[in-house]
Amino acid sequence: MSVKEKVIQIIAEQALLDAADVRLSATLEDLGIDSLGVVESIFAIEEEFDIEVPFNANAPAESEFDISSVSAIISAVEALVAEQS
């Protein structure tokens, strides 16, 4: 499974949706994921890929990790995974 597929699966699980229903252009808010859900999604991503995500839950807008859309999250995770390699 690719990084993209795994990230979509994690987000879908958090949103209680089928992975096929997660659009790349959707925001986490569009998918019904609240701030606690965002944090849980970040933890799940960190665990799945064994990476550290630079995300500050207290100031998400100031974080280096872009959570503006599903596509942005996938790109950010791919970059972190590539850095680790």
Image (tube, rainbow, N blue to C red):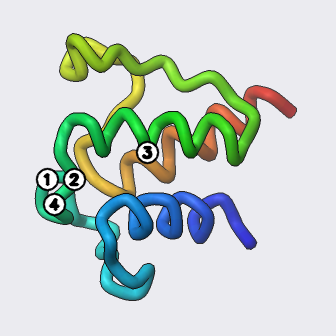
- From what the image shows, is residue 10 above or below residue 53? below
Labels 2 & 4 near each other (Cβ < 8 A): yes
Q: Is residue 17 left or right of residue 80?
A: left
Query: In percent of the image, x 17 and y 45: which residue is there?
Result: 34
Instruction: List the single residue furthest toward the right.
Output: 85
Chain-order first, disc 4 or disc 3: 4
Badge 3 amino acid: Ser
- From what the image shows, is residue 48 above or below residue 65? below
Labels 1 & 2 near each other (Cβ < 8 A): yes
Residue 33 is tagged as: 2
Q: SS of the residue at dot 1?
A: loop
Distance CA(mark 1)–CA(mark 4): 5 Å
Labels 1 & 4 near each other (Cβ < 8 A): yes
Labels 4 & 3 near each other (Cβ < 8 A): no
Q: Quadrant of the N terminus?
A: bottom right
Label 4: which residue?
Answer: 32
Chain-order first, disc 3 or disc 1: 1
